[in-house]
Amino acid sequence: MKTIGIIGGMGPMATVDLMEKIIQETDAHEDQEHIPILVDNNTRIPDRTAAILGQGESPVPELLRSAKRLTEAGADFLIMGCNTAHYFLPAMLPHLTVPFLSIIDTAVRFCQSQGFHKIGLLASAGTCKSGIYQKALQKAGISVLMPGREQESAIHNMIYEGVKAGKENYDTAAVECALASIKADGAEAFLLGCTEIPVAVRMYHIKGNFIDATDVLAKEAIRLAGAAIRA
């Protein structure tokens, strides 16, 4: 069985969520049937959204330090739960010595497999601005519905002021209004394109037809590691 390396710390709770999903989704009946996982919870990685918006330093050097530590420790392939960080993946790939499994690619393949034609994207401001999901989905023939500026701010604030700040009680009324608006525009489902949003959905009991990109990545990582997915 292959060892999974998780470039983590973006943020810490989202890293735990990804690892937990891998463990929960693995068809294992004893410790020895679970997948070996190495995690570098690198909280020194600069904020990805700030870097994309030109308001902060590049996260690439720290991302590569994490990749190097994981590879040297024995990871057979790498993943990272942070969707926004995948904007910097092209700059990372030439320096990696083991395969990398992309959350963007796995999420888009899942949307295709489900026959979706119109997806609402819920993501951080950095992910929205980067266009990484829009380009991949449109290339796959799937239309993307984006939140408006105020709606995007509401979602972004929930990520940073709610989940990242560790607030168990957070007013999600503006986010729920955004979901209703995007659904009214024809969204068949909502792609949770930020690692903190699945955490927010669970923490704040938000309802909707959601595609959890983290869960999709976890299942693909299980397959690549050579284990079976729990039925």
Image (cartoon, rainbow, N blue to C red):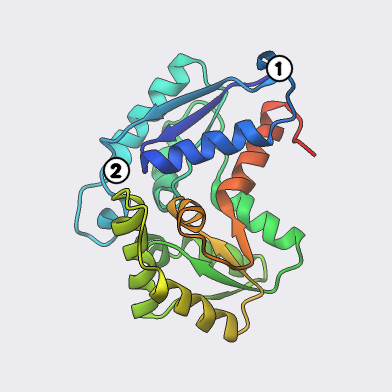
Q: Is residue 49 above or below residue 144?
A: above
Task: Compare residues 228 and 205 and report the one nearer the observer.
Answer: 205
Give the camera-side residue of 52 and 164. 164
- When asked about the image quadrant of residue 68, the answer is top left
Q: Is residue 46 left or right of residue 152?
A: left
User: With 98 as the anchor, is 130 left or right in this view?
Assistant: left
Disc 1 to disc 2, C-alpha distance:
38 Å
Q: Please tell me how crowded label 1 is: few (under 14), some (14-19), or many (20+) other residues with Cα within 10 Å.
A: few
> Do the residues under discs 1 and 2 have CB atoms within 8 angstroms?
no
For the C terminus, the quadrant is top right
Q: Which amino acid does label 2 sit on?
A: Pro
Which residue is at a point 50% across and 40% down the rendered structure image?
17
Q: Which residue lies furthest to the front in this view?
A: 169
Using the rendered image of the protein, determine whether residue 211 is visible from the camera's viewpoint: yes
* Residue 98 horizontal side relative to residue 89, left or right: right
Task: Name the quadrant of the N terminus.
Answer: top right
Position in image of residue 48 (x %, y %): 32, 51
Q: Which badge, 1 or 2, comes first in the chain's sequence? A: 1
Circle 1: residue type: Glu
Instruction: Provide the residue designation for mark 2.
Output: 59
- Residue at 41 percent of width and 35 percent of height: 8
Give the x, y percent position of residue 104. Answer: 55, 53
Which element is circle 2 on?
loop
Please tell me in which quadrant of the rendered image residue 118 appears. Answer: bottom right
Mark 1 residue element: loop
Q: Which of 76 and 211 is in front in this view?
A: 211
